[in-house]
Image (cartoon, rainbow, N blue to C red):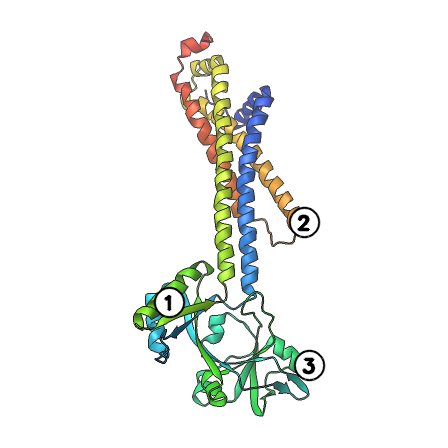
Amino acid sequence: MALSPADLILTTFRDLGGNWVRSGLTTLGIFMGVAAVNATLNIEAITAAQIQQKLALRDNPFVIPWIYDPTGTKPPPELGEEDFVAMQQVVPGIYGVGQSTRVFNVDQVRHQGQVSNEADIEGVSLNFQQMTGRQMLAGRFFQQSDFDEYYPVAVIDSVLAEQLFTEAPPVGQGLFLDTIRLTVIGVVETKRWRGDSEPSGTVWVTQNYADAIAGQFTWGRTQVAIAQLENYQAVEDGVTTFLEQRYPGFEVGAWGNAEDLYREEQQQRTSTRILKGVGVLALVIGGVGIANITIAAVMERTREIGLRRAIGATDWEVMVQFIAEAALLSLIGGTAAIATIHGLTKVATTQVFEAPYTFRVQDAAISMGAAFVVGVGASFFPALRITQIDVVQALRGE
C-alpha cells in the first residue's frame, strides 16, 4: 500500500528522528561537502570578477609584435592590410588588428591658458576605438572622411579633457599641439596601458595626419586585439609563428598589456581545480555516510518492510521511503551549507577585505544539485536490498 505524500513526509521525519545522532552526522557530512563546493564556486566567481575589474581599467587585451633583422643588415618589413587579413584567418582568437603611430615631436598640448606637457599623441586607425574597447563619452570617433580629407580633428581622453577644458565641454573647441590647431570632435574614456601605469592624458588624431605632422619623429606599431583573456598566450604565440613563417630570415618579438592578468587567471584556475577536487571528495564522504545509514535502516526495519509488502506495497514504494530520507538529509545539509557560506562570504568580502561578491543562484543550484545527486545516488543501491528481502522471513524479523 502506497503512502500519501503527507504520510511519506511524516514517516520520514519520524524515522530520521528515531536515530537523530546518526542522522545528524550524515547531515553534517553533506553540509561539509556542499559547503566546500559552494565556497569553491564563490571563490571562483570572486577571483573572476576581480580580474575583470582590473582588465576594465585597461584597453582590451592586446599584443604588439615587432619584426627585426638579427644581422642588422635589412630593414624590417612594414605590415599592411594583407598581413592583417591573413593573420586573422590563420590565428584564432583575434578580435581585430589595427595600427597606431606615436608622435614624439610635440612638446605640449594646450587650450587657452591650460597646458599639458605629458600628454601622449597618437595617430590611430579607423578601428582603433573599437579595438581598445574604450567608450565614447561625448561627440564621435573618426570617420573615413576624416582620413581621406586629412581633417585637423582630434579625439581626447577624459583625463586630458579635465585638465584642459575646465570651463566648457571640449567637443567643438580648439586644441593646440604646439602651433598646430585641431578641433576636438570626441571624448573617450581613459584607460591604462598596464596595471602599473598612471594615465597622463591622450590625444588621438587620424594616422595619416599624424604621419604628416610628425615626420621622422614617430613610432608605428601594429596592435592585435584579443577576444578573450584566456586566449592571450595562444594568440601571442600564433602571431609570432605566423609572422616568422611569412617573413623568413627575420625574427619576431611581442609585447602585450595583459600578461600579468593572464598569469593570474591561470593560477586561479589551477587553485580552483584543486578546491573543486576537495569539495567533490567531501561530497563523496557525505555520500558514504548516507549509504551507511540507508543500509543500517534497511536492516533495522526488516519487520516493517515485510509488513508493508505483505499488505500490498511494492518494492519501489518501499524504496521511495528510504530514498526520501536521504533526500531530506541532503536538503537540510545543503540548504544550511549554502546559507552559511553565503553569510561568511558576505562578511569576509565586506569586513575583512573588499572584493566583488554577489549571491549567484546558479552556484547555489549547482551546489544543491550535487547534494541531491550524492544523497539520492548513495541511498539508491543500498535501498535495492529491499527487493532481496523475503516477506515471510521479514515478518519473522529474520
* Tag in front: 3 or 1: 1
Q: Residue at x 44, y 65 (%)?
A: 226
The residue that disc 3 covers is 166
In the displayed structure image, the side of residue 366 where residue 78 appears, left or right: left
Instruction: Find residue 365 and name its label.
Output: none
Judging by the rendered image, the residue that carries numbered circle 1 is 240
Q: Nearer the viewer, residue 376 or 29?
A: 29
- Residue type (three-letter) at the residue carrying disc 3: Thr
Placement of 121 over or under 194, stated as above or below: below
Q: CA distance from mark 3 to mark 1?
A: 45 Å
Residue 331 x/y as whole percent: 55, 34
Q: How dense is the environment of label 1, judged by Cα within 10 Å: few (below 14), some, or many (20 and up)?
A: many
Q: Residue at image x 56%, y 43%? A: 39
Camera-nearest residue between 110 and 72: 72
Residue 201 in the image, given as x and y percentages of width and height: 60, 77
Q: Which residue is mark 2?
A: 352
